[in-house]
Image (cartoon, rainbow, N blue to C red):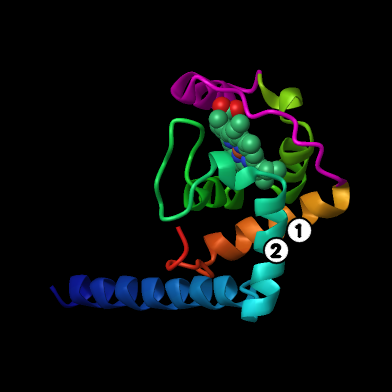
Amino acid sequence: MKGLRFLGVAIIAVSIITSSVAFAKDNSTKKQYTKKELKQLRDVFDNYGCSGCHMYMHKDSTSGPAVAVIAAMSKAKTKEWVESWIMNPKKHYNEPDVRALINQYVQYMPNNGVTKEDAEKLYEYLMAVANGAYDKKKK
Ligand code: HEC
């Protein structure tokens, strides 16, 4: 019985330590943005017309997944993949997960003529959204 109790305590201790390490690691990657910086990134998103299909306020539209959704999807992928997708989605249409989205939205994301420099900004914007810098007031 004593041995079991010790094992239980040890498991709890290890999980607390690993979760706090994971938390610390996650926190260190979160950049704090000023309102102005965030607006500049958001302007890039709006100026390319991304927000025409990707809506704010966690709402999906028939034209595409919500901003928070594509931000979370982008966070799960590499920076290189996301920037490549933003600059040339067509290159990725045949990948199985993309194909599933195309079938779901009955829509192909078009090429929006995004430059490499702006693709980096858009990636940064999506990461800021994924990490919680989300302007809830704006629709
Ligand atoms: C005409 C509508 C439309 C526009 C404009 C548009 N998208 Fe999309 N986007 C979609 C659709 C639809 C999907 C789901 C994949 C598909 O069906 O092609 C998508 C998917 C995505 C994804 C997720 C890709 C993945 O599989 O992880 C990202 C990121 C994204 N869009 C970013 C952008 C950015 C940045 C812009 C502006 C440069 C933009 N989109 C403009 C319709 C659009």
Report the residue at 43% width, 37% height from top: 61
Looking at the image, which is closer to me, 139 or 65? 139
Disc 2: residue Cβ within 8 A of ligand 1's nearest atom: no
Ligand 1 falls in quadrant: top right
Let me know if residue 14 appears in the view. Answer: yes
Q: Quadrant of the N terminus?
A: bottom left
- Which image quadrant is residue 121 in? bottom right
Residue 121, disc: 1
Q: Quick one: SS at disc 1? A: helix
Above or below residue 71? Residue 129 is below
The image quadrant where one finds the C terminus is bottom left
Please report the residue visible at 46 percent of the width from the left and 78 percent of the height from the top: 20
Q: Position of residue 39 (x, y in %)?
A: 65, 69
Provide the residue designation for mark 2. 41
Label 1 crowding class (10 Å Cα cut-off): few <14, some 14-19, many 20+? some
Magenta segment includes 108: yes
Mark 1 against mark 2, which lies toward the viewer?
2
Question: Which residue occupies 47% across, 45% down?
Answer: 66
Give the class, few, some or many, for how many residues have Cα within 10 Å of label 2's Cα (few <14, many ≥20). some
Instruction: Look at the image and tell me whether residue 77 can be seen.
Output: no
- Of 135 and 126, the residue lying toward us: 135
Residue 102: image quadrant is top right
Q: Position of residue 27 (x, y in %)?
A: 56, 76
Q: Hey, what amino acid is under mark 2?
A: Leu
Q: Left of 31 or right of it: where is 26? A: left
Secondary structure, mark 2, is helix
**Residue stretch rendered in magenta on the structure:** 94-115
Does 51 sit above or below residue 28?
Answer: above
Mark 1–mark 2 distance (CA, rounded to whole Å): 6 Å
